[in-house]
C-alpha cells in the first residue's frame, strides 16, 4: 500500500469568495519564510506541527460542500504553500483527476530558476497562479518582507513564458507602496508579461491587530491608517495607466 503524503495545514475555509474565480474551497498551509509588516496571518508563519492532513482527507471535505462552490474549485494559500510543494503536487494531481479547478496563492519567493523541476511538475496540475507582488522596488521589498523580490519577479516571468494564467495581487500601503513612482514601475513591469488575467489592488487594513495581541507579537504598522477602497482604485488606475503606456511602445 502506497504511503500517503501529509500536509501541515493551518485551517480550511469552505466558502472563499476572494481566493480565485467563483466560490472556493481554501486550504491554508502552515509555514512562511516571509515576514510582511502587514501580514494578516502571523499564526501561519512558523512551520510547527498544526494539523496533519492527507490530500484524500482534504478532497473528502471538498466533496461534502462542492455543490455550494459555484464556478469555483480549490485554492491553496498560507502561509506559503510552496514550502510544501510535494504535498501541493499530490493534492492538485488528485484534484485534476476529479476535474476540480486548482489555484495557488503564493508570493513566489521560493522560486529558483536554476532548479524548476518541482515547479514544472506542479504547474502541470495548476489552472491559476495568484501571485502576490508585495513591492516592485527590491530594497523596499526587503524592508517590507525581510526578503528580496528577485525570485518573485523571476517567477512571474517564468509563468509568462510558460503561459500559465496569473492573477496579480498588490496591497497598497500608506507611505510604503502608496507611491506614484512605485505604482508606475509596477505597471511597466507587468506590461512585459503576457499571462495576466486579473489585477487585484487591495487597500491596506489593520484588522489583524487583535491576532498580534493574542500572539503577543508587536504589530509593526499599528500607527498607519487603513486605506479606503477609493484610494486602492486610484492606485490601480495609476498601475494600469503605466501598463497601457508601456504596452503601446
Image (cartoon, rainbow, N blue to C red):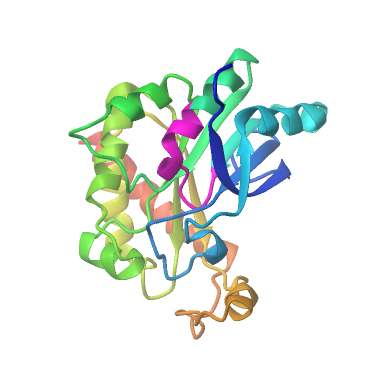
Percent coordinates x, y for residue 103 in the rendering? 53, 33
Instruction: Please state, as top left, top right, bottom left or bottom right, where the N terminus lies in the image.
Output: top right
Q: Is residue 94 above or below residue 131?
A: above
For residue 242, say whether it is visible: yes
Percent coordinates x, y for residue 247 in the rendering? 27, 36
Q: Nearer the viewer, residue 227 or 117?
A: 117
Q: What residue is at 76 percent from the left and 26 percent from the top?
A: 63
Percent coordinates x, y for residue 21 in the rendering? 61, 33
Q: What residue is at 57 percent from the left and 69 percent from the top?
A: 205
Q: Is residue 136 above or below residue 174?
A: above
- Say whether residue 114 is left or right of residue 87: left
Q: Is residue 151 above or below residue 158?
A: below
Q: What residue is at 27 percent from the left and 25 percent from the top?
A: 161
Question: Is 61 covered by the magenta stretch?
Answer: no
Question: Is 79 covered by the magenta stretch?
Answer: yes
Q: Which span of residues is magenta-colored?
A: 77-89
Q: Is residue 17 above or below residue 184?
A: above
Quick one: which residue is furthest to the front in this view?
Answer: 1
- Say whether residue 147 is left or right of residue 128: left
Percent coordinates x, y for residue 44 in the rendering? 53, 59
Q: What residue is at 61 percent from the left and 44 percent from the top?
A: 52
Q: Quadrant of residue 58?
A: top right
Q: Quadrant of residue 17?
A: top right
Secondary structure mostly seen in the magenta stretch = helix
Q: Nearer the viewer, residue 81 or 139?
A: 81
For residue 72, say whether it is visible: no
Quick one: which residue is furthest to the bottom in this view?
Answer: 223
Amino acid at each position: 500500500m502506497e504511503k500517503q503524503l501529509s500536509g501541515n495545514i493551518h485551517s480550511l475555509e469552505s466558502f472563499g469568495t476572494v481566493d480565485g474565480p467563483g466560490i472556493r474551497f481554501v486550504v491554508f498551509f502552515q509555514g512562511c519564510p516571509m515576514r510582511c509588516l502587514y501580514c494578516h496571518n502571523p499564526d501561519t508563519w512558523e512551520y510547527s506541527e498544526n494539523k496533519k492532513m492527507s490530500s484524500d482527507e482534504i478532497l473528502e471535505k471538498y466533496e461534502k460542500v462542492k455543490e455550494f462552490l459555484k464556478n469555483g474549485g480549490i485554492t491553496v494559500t498560507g502561509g506559503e504553500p510552496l514550502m510544501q510543494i510535494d504535498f501541493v503536487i499530490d493534492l492538485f494531481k488528485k484534484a485534476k483527476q476529479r476535474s476540480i479547478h486548482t489555484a495557488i496563492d503564493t508570493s513566489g519567493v521560493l522560486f529558483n530558476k536554476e532548479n524548476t523541476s518541482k515547479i514544472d511538475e506542479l504547474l502541470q496540475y495548476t489552472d491559476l497562479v495568484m501571485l502576490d507582488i508585495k513591492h516592485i522596488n527590491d530594497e523596499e521589498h526587503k524592508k517590507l518582507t525581510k526578503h528580496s523580490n528577485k525570485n518573485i519577479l523571476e517567477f512571474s516571468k517564468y509563468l509568462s513564458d510558460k503561459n500559465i494564467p496569473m492573477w496579480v495581487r498588490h496591497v497598497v500601503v500608506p507611505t510604503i507602496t502608496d507611491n506614484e513612482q512605485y505604482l508606475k514601475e509596477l505597471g511597466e513591469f507587468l506590461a512585459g508579461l503576457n499571462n495576466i488575467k486579473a489585477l487585484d489592488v487591495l487597500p491596506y487594513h489593520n484588522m489583524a491587530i487583535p491576532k498580534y495581541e493574542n500572539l503577543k507579537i508587536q504589530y509593526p504598522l499599528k500607527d498607519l491608517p487603513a486605506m479606503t477602497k477609493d484610494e486602492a482604485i486610484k492606485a490601480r488606475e495609476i498601475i494600469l495607466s503605466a501598463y497601457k503606456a508601456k504596452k503601446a511602445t
